[in-house]
Image (cartoon, rainbow, N blue to C red):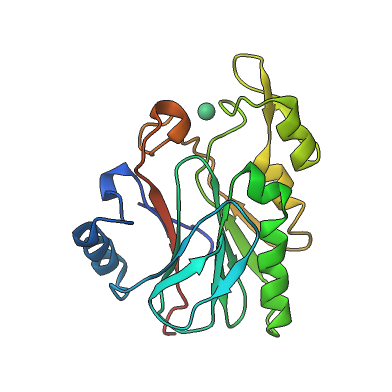
Amino acid sequence: MILARGFPGIAFTEVNDGDLRHDMVARRTVSDTLGIPHGWAVANQVHGSHIAIARSAGNVGEADGIVTSVTMLPIAVSVADCVPVVLLGTCSVAVVHAGWRGVASGVVGCALRAMDDSGDRVQGAVIGPHIGPCCFEVGSEVVDAVGGYATRTSNGTLSVDLASAIRDQLVGVEIESEVECTMHDDRFYSHRRNATKERQMAVAWISQD
Ligand SMILES: [Zn+2]
């Protein structure tokens, strides 16, 4: 498990922690380690840009971002190469699932606006472990969809830098980035590496104090 260094209430799980979407024993173990409730708010992720508001634990339906202003309500997204992003406001927090389709549809900016619209202001953001430009081989249609950010993989093939695209959706926000690449670092599940159906999770919550 990786805890955000500069911000409280944010954790990114690893293979060691299990697949917390379906393994409720593993989710309880991680919750106990973090000192948070066992009931989390989660979403049916569809690579879109809809942001759901969570007021209690359970499934919020189809969404790729969840916002809550409820203290000690863990909210989580699952990923295996896509980028998990956590946004921290003064009285709310958001988790976002951003693959290239989500980045293309501006899902991180949508979460930022959802928090703004509710009267909060985003103070900081944490970009979690995801497939790095080193491994993220794409076609030119992905670069076009994301709006640029072309780079090269470590093999010299076309790649796209999703984290840079996300940073540009967060102008004026202090950003912390985890540098791990989920594909070449086997501490993480990677769909690109072996088509796994298992996922790590990004979980965030508003602490009691
Ligand atoms: Zn890599």
- Of residues 57 and 149, the one drawn nearer to the viewer in this rendering: 57
> Vertical placement of 186 versus 41: above or below?
above
Question: For residue 53, which quarter of the picture?
Answer: bottom right
Q: Residue at x 38, y 38 (%)?
A: 189
Question: For residue 64, which quarter of the picture?
Answer: bottom right
Residue 83 shown left or right of residue 56 in the figure: right
Q: Position of residue 156 (x, y in %)?
A: 66, 14
Residue 2 shown left or right of residue 176 in the figure: left
Q: Residue at x 68, y 83 (%)?
A: 118
Q: Residue at x 72, y 61 (%)?
A: 109
Q: Position of residue 56 (x, y in %)?
A: 41, 82
Residue 104 shown left or right of residue 2 in the figure: right
Question: For residue 139, which quarter of the picture?
Answer: top right
Q: Residue furthest left?
A: 25
Q: Position of residue 190 (x, y in %)?
A: 43, 35
> Vertical placement of 117 versus 5: above or below?
below
